Amino acid sequence: MAEHVDRLGEEHPPIPVDSADYSMKRPEVLAEQFGPVLTYMARVELEVERNVLELNLLLPDPPAVDQHFYADVWLPQEIHHGLLLDKLQRLAGLPPSDPDLSSIEFSYRVLGALGRWSPVQDVSRMLYYLTGVATEQSAILAYNKLHQGLLDLGEEAVASTIIAPIRRQEPGHFAYYKIAAQGLWTELSQWQKWLIRTLRRHTFEPVGAYTKKQWAEFGAVMHHLGITTEDGTGVSRYAQQIGRVEMELLWAQRQGLRVPTYIVDSLKSAAKLAAADRSVAG
């Protein structure tokens, strides 16, 4: 794992914000088609600064490789993703990002205090890995669709110099979380696995969606990426891709279950909230 993290840092340094070509043929069309996607993803990427503060509370004594990954490799890479996307959206005529970099839920402080007992910290670590797996897989899928959508608009410059470099860095993050989750799961006791399943079922949320408004914004992202319009099955397929690792680890005993129901329900709920907003706006 340490070698993987070192390689990520060496092979994928943070993308310089000024290295990209921000020239757009039709910025107003880009903003109309993908503005909600850029706005949401820029905010989520920039909020990793707060996510690291949360991790420092949640994991009072983390493995050195975890801390090296999220503080030295993941954090600077993701912040630069956010800066690239934020500059692009501003040049397209959209408002700048307004990330929340300081608000930390009380539950993190409680879990952090309990985490001084190593079995509880292992539960928190597993939840962290599972969230990372779902987040990174969601990001990979979204960046792939955004890249293709920009190419379809004829915006080759921003697609090839902003979105393509960003999406090249996400699979390495996904691999880290997946390997870490698979390794830790084999070491957990039955009561820890039960607690993780229970907490995951009741706390899962779409990436970056902490309020009802943000759930609707995530639904809008799926709409603008075409996920909610793919023959009526796009959301379910998206959920299956996001939840595949989680399904294989946590719910392997549930024969016939293709994806945890709480993932599908969460995405469908976000889609419905976004549809309601469009109906009101229309």
Image (cartoon, grey):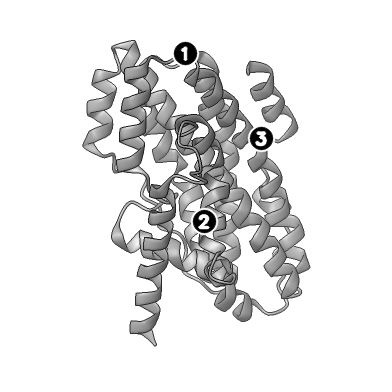
- Pointer 1 residue: 187
**Residue type beneath disc 1:** Glu
- Give the alpha-carbon distance from disc 2 to disc 1, as whole Å: 34 Å
Q: CA distance from mark 1 to mark 3?
A: 23 Å
175 is higher (above) or lower (below) than 239: above
The residue tagged 3 is 172
Lower position in the chain sequence, tag 1 or tag 3: 3
- Residue nearer the viewer, 163 or 91: 163
Looking at the rendering, in which quadrant would you find the N terminus? top right
Q: Where in the figure is residue 47, as x and y percent of width and height? A: 43, 46
Label 3, residues with CA under 10 Å away: few <14, some 14-19, many ≥20: some
Q: Residue at x 58, y 72 (%)?
A: 231
Tell me the amino acid under the disc marked 3.
Gly
Judge whether 14 appears above or below 281 on screen. above
Residue at the spot x=39%, y=39% of the render? 50
Circle 1 packing at 10 Å, graded few (<14), some (14-19), many (20+), is few
Q: Quadrant of the C terminus?
A: bottom left
| Side of 181 relative to 57 (left or right) | right
> Nearer the viewer's eye, disc 2 or disc 3?
3
Q: Which quadrant of the figure has residue 76?
A: top right
Q: Which amino acid is tagged 2?
A: Met
Total residue callouts: 3
Are discs 2 and 1 less than 8 Å apart at CB?
no
